[in-house]
Image (cartoon, coloured by chain):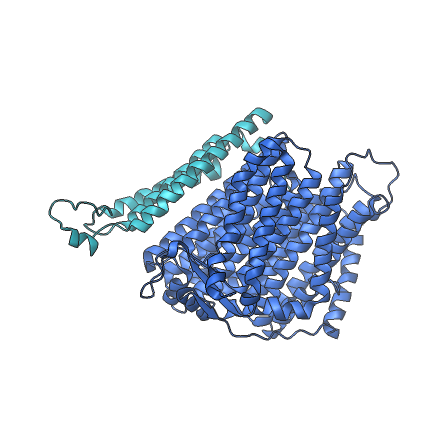
Amino acid sequence: MILVNYLAAAALLSIGLYAVLTRRNMIKMVMGLSLMEAATYLFMISLAYRSGSTAPVLLSPPPGQTEHSLVHGNVADPVLQNFCLTAVVIGVAVTAVFLSVVVRIAQHYRTLDSDRVRELRG
Amino acid sequence: MTIAALSSLLPLPVAIPLAGAVTAPLLARASSRLAVIVSLLAMAGSAAILLIEAPAVFGGRVIAQYLGNWRPAGGHVLGVTFAADPFGLLVALAAALIGAILLLYTLSELGGLGHRELGGYACLFQLLIAAVIGAALTADLFNLFVWFEVAALSSYGLAGFFLERPIALEAAFKVLVLTTLASFSVFVGAGLEYARHGALSFAQLHHALAGHAGPADAIALGLLIAGFATKAGLAPFHGWLADVHTAAPGPVNALFSALMDALGVVAIVRLVFQVYGVHGLPVLGLLMALGLGSALLGGIMALAQDDLKRLLAYDTISQVGIVVIGFATGNSAGVAGGVYHLVNHAAFKALLFLAAGAVLHRTGRTRLSELGGLARRMPVATAAFVLGALSIAGIPPLNGYVSLSLIHSGLQQDHETIPYVLTLAAQVITAAALGRAAWLGFFRPRRGEYEWQERVRPGMLTALVSLGAGCIAFGAFGPEVLRRLMAPAAAGLLHPGRYASAVLAGSGRLPALAVPFDYGSPAELISVGLSVLVAAALAWLYLRIREPLPVRVLRAAHTGSANDYAGYAIAGTLLVIAALRFA
């Protein structure tokens, strides 16, 4: 079951990386990076999962489980989920900065082709 | 002051600049200069608190503070820990003091900007310095990732600060792509370590890892090193560095080169020495390879540059490489030399970039081919540039001499002949590059007069003089600085067990470490003299020949395309992981 998650994360990462390495359109590069970001979240959430575990919310246990069983064990790891929450917030900010830079580049250079925006080289 | 009081002060050096960053844009509405002045005061406050901590910490104490009062229970650290060891405190102190000097320079050079620009500038500037101080003091892997991201986000803003200059946008795009890739790498690396060991505290990870790191740990360390190497500007992760420096204003160059790179180096060094330990994984060999590659590549690329800021930026890559070489020796002389050179680099590279910034401010030019004859026209900037260049070349009694001799003796102790020769070669090339720049920009006679732009103001001069004085003081009092500051810092890195137990216990002592250093060592003086002669000859030769093949190949590899640079970084990440996993 959980193997599917890892495979999906690997596939997303590869697609995103392919876009970053081969697409010259800057919007597509940003999209590729967003895909890679999503892959890291999926990977982390899958790492947090333990077989048969429930969500790490300790308010009222799901049917068939007591509060005691939740405290002592079978919940998904909340720390890794917190990792993802933090990273999602940062990721939103980074994507916003990214897109605003791309918009300004498009205004100045009248192109989105990263190959035509390389005055700085060598 | 008691240890408990010192420990309770520990979050303040980060909290003060963070508060300053929030208030700066608000104050800028009243007066744009006020925002920078308050930021300057915030930096000074942060430095003052760090100075209060300094006597105890450099006396060999490690002081920890559990944020939110989440104390460790049964050897498990529950919250984020800040721990001041001599190494972290040294870098934090350098960041706060140099940050204050850079803000003074900013006030002088950019004080006339509009309130929105200057408010945003002061905010981002302080965020970046807070991130460097936080990364230096934290003892928590995820917290380190957060400081990495804080530094990254503020660096995007500062890189694209001159929004009306298209090259600033181009540079901002490249740094965004590369740093975002690096952040994924750090994020996944940290997550893997947590998933394996259920711990984020450096102390707990140290106990779980030191000596018996498995294959998954090797992959995680590879990801972490690759991510932080991007921030440090090590080759092949350096694609963004030169471009960003070309486009940004002088104080921002100095901030990036002197302090933001230090964040990457501090993170790598902490992970390698204090978390993973240097035994087990072939990590020192990897650091040596990264350091030598960066030192040589940065030097060669610097030799070929026409833009003064770009030249200095490539030189940063070279100097960070040399710092990493020092750490990669793993012995006390080399590690103390690495710490020493990291601090020295912050001082002399800030000095060089501010001198270049003053030249740009006064003449409106940064191309060496358009400059010349500045020695007569701008004596203070020339003196600052020459002082910085001589420090990098390692001329006694300047600061570079002490740190470079220590790194050399670290390499010789372990009979690492080939790295030693390559290090010397990299230094000669770097010195030649700076000598060429000094000749073309400052001493070469120039016929026509410049169209003078702005004046050089007192704040800029004060900044240049204080950084120059720092370079001289850290050289002239070398043995004293080494004994009081650098040797304790190296002791903390070489005794990771003591650091780990101090983080768990709330405070602890480090053993004293004696690092021998002979100021007048004849062998070292002869090697300095010879390398200066060879460097002068190389610079002279380089001005007369057409570009040699290796330089052309390397320049052609720096295509300026974000796709290519991302490709280099990914290839580098895979190589680093493969080296740790299979070597």
Asked if residue B78 lies left or right of residue B508, the reply is: left
Asked if residue A21 lies left or right of residue B78, the reply is: right
Asked if residue B205 lies left or right of residue B108, the reply is: left
> x, y percentage for residue B348?
69, 54
> x, y percentage for residue B194?
35, 56
Of all residues, the one furthest to the left in this rendering is A64
Q: Do we see residue B551 in this rendering?
A: no
> x, y percentage for residue A83?
36, 47
Q: Colour of chain B?
A: blue
Q: Do we see residue B314 in this rendering?
A: yes
Looking at the picture, tell me which residue is in the foreground, B469 or B532: B469
Q: Residue at x 54, y 30 (%)?
A: A113
Looking at the picture, tell me which residue is in the foreground, A117 or B270: B270
Looking at the picture, tell me which residue is in the foreground, B546 or B429: B429
Q: Quadrant of residue A14?
A: top left
Q: Residue at x 72, y 53 (%)?
A: B466
Q: Is residue B361 above or below residue B8?
A: above
Of all residues, the one furthest to the right in this rendering is B447
Q: Residue at x 72, y 72 (%)?
A: B519
Q: Quadrant of the C terminus of chain B?
A: bottom left
Q: Is residue B226 above or below residue A96?
A: below
Q: Quadrant of residue B305?
A: top right
Looking at the picture, tell me which residue is in the foreground, B47 or B500: B47
> x, y percentage for residue B476?
73, 66
Q: Colour of chain A?
A: cyan
Query: Number of callouts in the render?
Result: 0
